[in-house]
Image: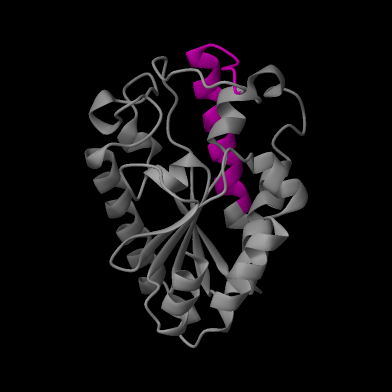
Amino acid sequence: MSFKFFWAAYRGQLKEIWVGDSHAALTPARELGKPLRHIEDGRWVCHLGPRLQFSIAARGLPPRILRVFRVVGRAKHAKDVLWVYSFGEIDVRCHLVPRMDEPGTYDFVPAYLERIREAARVTGSDRVLVYVPPPESDVAEEQTGFPVVGTLEERTRALHLMRDAMHKAADSMSDDGPRILLVDCIDEFSDEFGVWQWRYTYDGLHTNDEGRAVVRAEINRVLAADGAGR
């Protein structure tokens, strides 16, 4: 599949690439597949598995992945490719609640966005999108190795603290690099308690078709606003 990916890059047939956790794999597509795969119409997924936003902040994207991305960055149409990065939902669901009120808990968020900006430089991008993790729920199945930590109310609060940190960090980034644009659908996805509305999720964790339409509309809005502001 890597050959097909490189060939698509060479021919200018890459349009959009989602990179990251299961949300990167299941927001643009209905099912999981190979880690690097074509979905349709020039859209690709690069599923890196259950990685944390905290871990990306500390170590960056895996070097082997950056080597692949560097090839794309050398293609003549590199600036036309839209990159969307998704990390952070596992941080909220499994890790942040016990320390969310401690000073400095969310200090990794600016470093995370800087790591994404580093990747954007590798891929030759002027701008990249970063997906803000979606709402929490109390119906998603607990995954082996990833126990849910905290009540639904606590996890919802932890998510909103992360969201605030992401917006603050994005707004504070310098102007001397690729632009980091957030795709934030939390308000649309949430009920009055901040919990996933069932109309937008098929498992309490990932988007269904209606949820995907919300994300696509927000992507279009963010890109249009960025274009109008320049």
Q: Position of residue 154 (x, y in %)?
A: 55, 16
Residue 97: name its quadrant: top right
Residue at 44%, 71% in the rendered image:
4
Q: Position of residue 17 (x, y in %)?
A: 44, 62
The answer, for residue 116, to whether it is visible in the render is: yes
Residue 98: name its quadrant: top right
Which corner quadrant holds the C terminus?
Answer: bottom left
Is residue 176 positioned above or below 100 on the image? below
Residue at 66%, 25% in the rendered image:
95
Instruction: Pick whichever, 170 or 198, lies toward us.
Output: 198
Look at the image and say whether residue 147 sits in the magenta stretch: yes
Instruction: Pick whichever, 16 or 191, lies toward us.
Output: 16
Residue at 75%, 24% in the rendered image:
102
The answer, for residue 173, to whether it is visible in the render is: no
Residue 207: name its quadrant: top left
Instruction: Pick whichever, 178 or 171, lies toward us.
Output: 178
Is residue 136 positioned above or below 106 on the image? above
Look at the image and say whether residue 74 sits in the magenta stretch: no
Q: Residue furthest bottom?
A: 76
Q: Position of residue 78 (x, y in %)?
A: 49, 80
The magenta stretch is 146-169
Q: Residue furthest top?
A: 151
Is residue 78 positioned above or below 216 on the image? below
Q: Position of residue 164 (x, y in %)?
A: 56, 39
Is residue 223 positioned above or below 62 on the image? below
Residue at 37%, 24% in the rendered image:
204
Instruction: Pick whichever, 141 or 139, lies toward us.
Output: 141
Please identify the dominant SS of the magenta region: helix
Q: Tell me, what colour scheme is on the image?
A: one colour
